Image (spheres, helix red, strand yellow):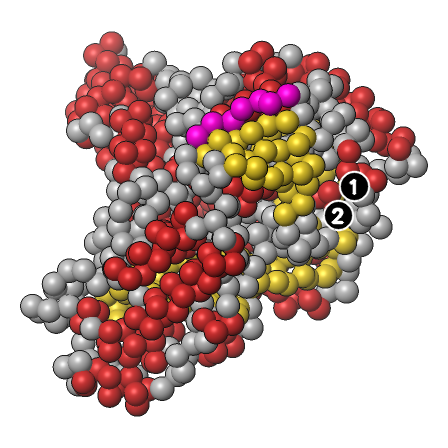
Amino acid sequence: MIAYIVQRFLQSVLVMAAVGFVAFSLFAYVGDPITIMLGQDYNETERARLAAQLGLDRPFYVQFFKFAVNAMQGDFGISYRLARPVSAVIRERLPATLELSLVAAILALAVGLPMGVYTGLRRDSWLSRVFLTVSLIGVSLPTFLIGILLILVFAVILGWLPSFGRGQTVMLGWWSTGFLTASGLKALILPSITLCLFQLTLILRLVRSEMLEVLRTDYIKFARARGLRDRAVHFRHALRNTLVPVITIAGLQLGAIIAFAIITETVFQWPGMGLLFIQSVSATDIPVMAAYLCLISFVFVVINFIVDLLYYVVDPRLRIDRGAVGGHG
Amino acid sequence: MTKKWAAVAVVAALAAGLAASAEAKTLRMSVAGDASTMDPHANNAGNTTLILKQIYEPLIDRNQKLEKVPGLALEWSNPEPNTWRFKLRQGVKFHDGSPFTADDVVFSITRALAPTSDFKLYVNGIKEAKKVDDFTVDLITTAPNPIVPDGLPRVHIMSKAWAEKNSVQQPQNFRQKEETFAVRNANGTGPFSLRSREPDSKTVLARNTAWWGWSQQGAGNLTEIVFTPINNDATRFSALMSGEIDFVLDPPVQNLEALKRNPKIKVLEGPENRTLYLAMDQKRDELLYSNVKGKNPFKDVRVRQAVYHAIDAEAIKTRVMRGQSVPTGSMWTQFVNGYSEGNDKRLPLDRDKAKKLLAEAGYPDGFEVTFDCPNNRYINDEQICIAIAGMLAQVGIKATVAAQPFTQFLPKVQRTETSFYLLAWGVPTFDALYTLQALIRSKGEGADGSFNYGNFSNAKIDALIDGVKSELDLNKRRNMMIEALKLHNDEVGNIPIHHQMIPWAMASNVFAHHQAENQLDAKWVKVD
């Protein structure tokens, strides 16, 4: 047990180190922040002075080492673009992204699950066909296009919902929330629909195929033979057994939602971390980009770690044969 | 501290609300990017200036025709060769209520001269600022300098006492690991005060009812400005179409037709004070990126003329820019001191002549060269380059377009790792010396040749430019600049293409004045 956890933990640390290294080395090639910071008129001495201030004149491995040591303490330096500590900037943007992701995840589950069950049970009804066709669109249309289309219909043509921003927010300590105002809730609708559509489709199709599979198994046949009502068979016996993989996937997808929020946030000018990242890319704001990538990969690593531990709890086989572990996660 | 400011702002806003017969006139405006700081001397970028110029004021302002007019200084003179004397406006107060005096001017000019200042070029040549009395300041120059007033409209005046109290005596420095107070707070004398600021999402400015200039003719009626940056072109466009935004400084070019068709929206168009041009490596003995070995074709003036003759700037205007450009033969616009119509004549489009010139220069079959081009900096920049490459192909020059983001393009060009490139140059001082020095003069000290990455060099032109720097007779000085550009054009040192037009889009009830610096001056804006 302990050995398994330690092994998983060490793997996670290794992944984080690799991500940090890749992120940092990529940024050596994205452009020159000094050019952006100095503007048009400057001379070589000014350039050298700024490079020395930022530590950009030192060799790559020294820069990376310094970055890694500071990053472990949560210090990602100061944003070149905003002239503020990166950790403060990210903390400001975090609530917007998390609230949006949470709403999108709940929406995906709350809508995708019933739709999946329905299409699994009533395979040939016209409504199932509509659901499946619509879900095909959800998978195949790029997020930004869906966002723009929603804006066009609901903001420009109908004028019902705002096309950008978070509306009025309320501060709860350092956490800014849009849940407590009417304009904040209204502003959530279009971005969360845009963001959830892909995951919703995924859950719908997953639940449907699991349901179809489970319904073919012997114990369902046996349950029917016992004369149980459809309701009991479908929901107590079938649905329950489909939920284990669904919950695993939904959990893993939470990380994906947070990461995919980049595009949705850009389209809706949602002031979260994804938008911050895009703005930082155009200004070659290396500290923010590095911090964002590390944070996102940290989220993924943590979720994966938890899922691995859950497997261990759920699946007794893992406790005997550690060799099989390599196949997961 | 912040709470107190908020209180001051709220009181000011309430007063403003009452003054405007209890009717709020809010302008909700948007551009693609946000200001990076509220520090008046730390970041010389358009997005930053757009907000700061509503809050802070310079000694000398520019009116709607871009002429110099009194700002915080009522009059200025040049009593001795090395001294410029400024008589200051009396009775002006900062937004925190403290009075404006000569100390603030001395402090601000000194701050703009500091090593971490991004505004040094506008106070170039000034050695120090001296207080004469409470409302008189002398600026001492290192040498006689007739254009000191031309840089000052970009230098904002801040409160000395406020800066000292909040320890922001120096412009913000990237070495400091802490955010300075001036990054998110501001205290100017201008027509609007900063009410709240959330970087990248929302900045609110409130009317400063105590501002001295509201009684001027043509003054606007805004009580509040809500500034929301929206990066995504389509979203910014949608927000304007749906009426959630009243004013967009940079509407996407591809949406202009749709905006013009919408009766609730109007589009103002005007030329920007910026010129796109082509530059060629004229120094190396062999081009870095070409199939010609052992010699550099661009060293031959006939080749440079051939390139010029091959370019159809009118076609670029109609096909690529959809009419949104002014083709030019000049390296600066008509707004700039030193402009002349004589220099604004392009070499005519003449492909036969271009081929003949190439043949005479020893390249009857043309040659190949890589053409470096930014793809996210100017309006349609990459398409312009592709069009030019097509035009050059017709006379036998095979230019391969290497389009790249500006953050990669510029460092490459600055290392002079280029043979042929497209760049644009604006003139914030409205004086042609700025362009002559940076783009045309040979590399030297300071600003001399600082952006002349093609290394064009001509001793006679250099001598003229150096003469301009110290010439005090303004007429003679202007003629020298015109002469220098004429010589440059004869030599085809660089090839100007056009000045880009910049459209502004706004709701039809907004009345604003288009400005070639691409800066909205909210004090003139009216909302019905």
The residue sitting at 20% across, 27% down in the picture is: A58
Q: Which residues are magenta?
A: B126-133
Sequence order check, earlier mark of 2 and 1: 1
Q: Nearer the viewer, residue A201 or B243?
A: B243
User: Which image quadrant is residue A306 in?
Assistant: top left
Is A293 located above or below residue A160 in the figure? above
State whether residue B487 appears in this view.
Answer: yes
Q: Is residue B127 magenta?
A: yes
State whether residue A198 appears in this view.
Answer: no
Residue B181 x %, y %: 54, 19
User: Which image quadrant is residue B452 in?
Assistant: bottom left
Q: Are marks 2 and 1 in contact (CB under 8 Å)?
A: yes
Q: Nearer the viewer, residue B187 or A117?
A: B187
Pinpoint the chain carrying mark 1: B
Identify the image quadrant of the N terminus of chain B: top right
In the structure shown, which secondary structural element does the residue marked by tag 2 occupy? loop
